[in-house]
Image (cartoon, grey):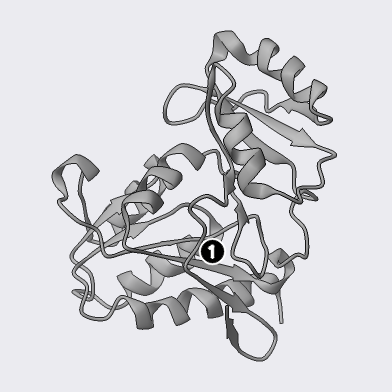
Amino acid sequence: MSSADKKQRAALAALNYVRGETLIGVGTGSTVNHLIDALAANPGSVTAAVSSSNASSERLRSAGIEVLDLNDVPALSIYIDGADEATRTRHLIKGGGAALTREKIVAEVAGEFVCIIDDSKLVETLGAFPLPVEVIPMARSYIARRLTGMGGRPVWRRGVTTDNGNHILDVHDLTINDAAGLEAALNQIPGVVTVGLFAQRPADLLLVGTDTDVVEI
């Protein structure tokens, strides 16, 4: 089974967790696109969403789903998003699509965070996927030097500007044994907007698409 088919399998499994919900939080990326397409195929299953990126907002509107500003939403029961890497402790690396800051905000607000991935994203230790860090543009070089001093190899993702107007540094060569500790440390560097580690607020549930079924973790 292809990776795309596994992603679709995980996305379809997530529909079981939105039954009865008229408002959900929706993330960003190829796996989430399968979820939005599934919602479009079932009109009325969800009437409104809070989105973590402009790209997802456009896709949701095309599916006939209203997109609300998070400031206008008193509560959000569930948020569904993908990940670039995930462990069995449900710690994640996210940000391959450069939407990490908004993703982290919506995940923090949601009562339940469901992460949908294919089994290639499930790892023992985070760090093979370069860790995205969103930074204020004027601080990019300074932060890169700090990250180098911490043992990483930061690479500016040239040509990419986040929906917030910021830059992304992708940090290579990390083996992340203490994800929550590293997340806290990086967030203290002046100019860092946020880091693509989701460990202080991990996923509540992983839905992992495999060749044969969907594994719940």
| Circle 1 crowding by C-alpha within 10 Å: few under 14, some 14–19, many from 20 | many
Query: Is residue 183 shown left or right of residue 78?
Result: right
Given residues 108 and 42, the one toward you in this image is 108
- Disc 1 marks which residue? 31
* The N terminus lies in quadrant: bottom right
Q: Give coordinates of residue 166: x percent, y percent.
A: 50, 22
Query: Is residue 158 shown left or right of residue 112?
Result: right
- In this view, 79 is above or below 208: above
Q: Give coordinates of residue 200: x percent, y percent.
A: 52, 50
* The C terminus lies in quadrant: bottom right
Residue located at (59% from left, 65% from top): 90
Residue located at (76% from left, 27% from top): 154
Q: Give coordinates of residue 143: x percent, y percent.
A: 67, 17
Count of numbered tags = 1
Kindly state the secondary structure of the residue where label 1 is placed: helix
Query: Is residue 133 visible in the rendered structure shown here?
Result: no
What is the residue that sits farthest to the top in this orientation?
138
Q: Give coordinates of residue 193: x percent, y percent.
A: 50, 27
Amino acid identity at mark 1: Thr
Quadrant location of residue 63? bottom left
- In this view, 158 is above or below 76: above
Quadrant location of residue 40? bottom left
Quadrant location of residue 14? bottom left
- In this view, 43 is above or below 99: below
Residue located at (64% from left, 15% from top): 140
- In this view, 164 is above or below 180: above
Query: Is residue 84 shown left or right of residue 109?
Result: right
Given residues 42 and 119, the one toward you in this image is 119
What is the residue that sits farthest to the bottom in this orientation?
212
Query: Is residue 119 visible in the rendered structure shown here?
Result: yes
Residue located at (39% from left, 74% from top): 38
